[in-house]
Structure formats: structure tokens, C-alpha cells
Image (cartoon, rainbow, N blue to C red):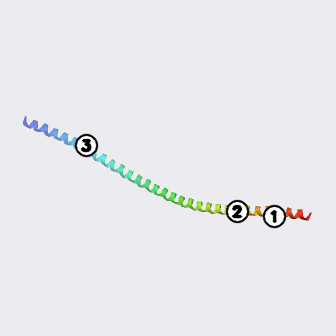
Amino acid sequence: MDGENASRQLKNLSDQLRKIIDENKDLHEELREGQEKLRISNAQQQKLLQELNDHKMRISGSDQQTEEFKKKIQGLLKQTESLDDEMRKGQEGLRLSTSQNAKLMQELN
């Protein structure tokens, strides 16, 4: 009977060991899958960071272009103001000239 108990215990221990080995294999597979997912996630993160940096560079370039356009627009506004002043002076000169011509015409008649 002692041999039978030892045999049963040995079988029970063997069964428990098989279960632990199977569980260990499952855990090892889960770990491997988790590591692969982490590797893929890291690759995706790097790709997204690169895209973000590319967008930042494009935005920076756009900001520079915007500043250049602002400067050009300011220059054109100054030119427009200057031309407006010249036009007003010309109109005033024309008005005065017309007024003087009318005076001269009255004096001649």
C-alpha cells in the first residue's frame, strides 16, 4: 500500500508538473505576443513622432511665408498710402488750376 501511495503521489506530482509546464508555455507565448505588440507599438510611435516633426517643420515654413507676406502687404499698403497722398495733391492742384483758369477767363471777358 505504501508503494501505491507513493505511485499515486508521484502521478499527482507529475500531473501538477505537466499543468505547470503547460501554464508556463502559455505564459511564455503571452509574453512573446506582448513583446511583439510592444515592438509594433514603438514602431508606430516613432512613425507618428516623425510625422509630427514633419508637420512642425511645415508649419514653421508656413509661418515664415506668412511673415514674408505680411511684410509685402505692409509695403504695398505704404505705397498705396503714398499714391493716395499724391492723388489728393494732384486733385487739389487741378482744383486750384481750374479755379485760376475760371478767374482768368472772367478777367478776359
* Of pointers 1 and 3, the one earlier in the residue sequence: 3
Residue type at tag 3: Glu
* Of pointers 3 and 2, the one earlier in the residue sequence: 3
Query: Dot 3 lies on which element?
Result: helix
Residue type at tag 2: Asp
Q: Residues within 10 Å of mark 2 (few under 14, many from 20)?
A: few
Observer-nearest of 14 and 47: 47
Residue bearing mark 2: 85
Query: Dot 1 lies on which element?
Result: helix
Query: Dot 2 lies on which element?
Result: helix
The residues bearing labels 1 and 3 have C-alpha atoms spaced at a distance of 108 Å
Question: Do labels 1 and 3 touch, CB within 8 Å?
Answer: no
Question: Do labels 2 and 1 touch, CB within 8 Å?
Answer: no
In this view, the mark in front (1 or 3): 1
Observer-nearest of 60 and 83: 83
Q: Could you tell me which residue is drawn at 28 percent across and 47 percent down? A: 28
- Looking at the picture, does residue 9 appear above or below residue 108? above
Q: Could you tell me which residue is drawn at 16 percent across and 40 percent down? A: 13
Residue lying farthest to the top in this orientation: 1
The residues bearing labels 2 and 1 have C-alpha atoms spaced at a distance of 18 Å
Residue bearing mark 1: 97
Q: Could you tell me which residue is drawn at 64 percent across and 62 percent down? A: 78
